[in-house]
Amino acid sequence: VAPSANRLLEAATRLLPAANQARYAEEYRSELWEIAYAGHPRRSQLRYASRQGVSSLHLRAELLSPHRRKASP
């Protein structure tokens, strides 16, 4: 696993509410290890980690206010 990708995922995890950090840290690490184990290069690992960083901002908003989401018609 690329150390820089691991650090990016740690930062993404810290953006989440404390109550959810352990769950998502494990999920992120697991997926990163699967990518590395499959033989994907460092660039792919960094791409995954950066995508998770961006999506963690949206996830944080949902986790902090789950009832704010509007129902689909």
Image: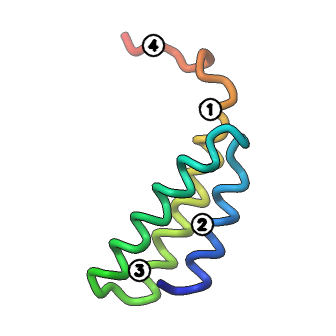
Mark carried by residue 71: 4
Q: What element carries label 3?
A: helix
Residue type highlighted by circle 2 = Leu
Q: What element carries label 4?
A: loop
Q: Do the residues labelled 1 and 2 touch (CB within 8 Å)?
A: no
* Residue located farthest toward the top when viewing the structure as drawn: 73
Residue at the location (47% across, 84% down)? 1
Q: Are marks 4 and 3 in contact (CB under 8 Å)?
A: no
Marks 4 and 1 sit apart, C-alpha to C-alpha, by 16 Å
Mark carried by residue 44: 3
Residue at the location (37% across, 81% down)? 36
Q: Do the residues labelled 4 and 2 touch (CB within 8 Å)?
A: no
* Residue 55, x across and y down, in percent: 55, 51
From the viewer's perspective, is residue 66 above or below residue 61? above
Mark carried by residue 6: none
Q: Which residue is labeled 2 in the image?
A: 9
Q: Do the residues labelled 2 and 3 touch (CB within 8 Å)?
A: no
* Residue 14, x across and y down, in percent: 72, 55
Marks 2 and 3 sit apart, C-alpha to C-alpha, by 13 Å
Give the mark nearest the N terminus, 1 or 2: 2
Q: Which residue is labeled 1 in the image?
A: 63
Q: What element carries label 1?
A: helix
Give the mark nearest the N terminus, 2 or 3: 2
Residue type highlighted by circle 3 = Ser
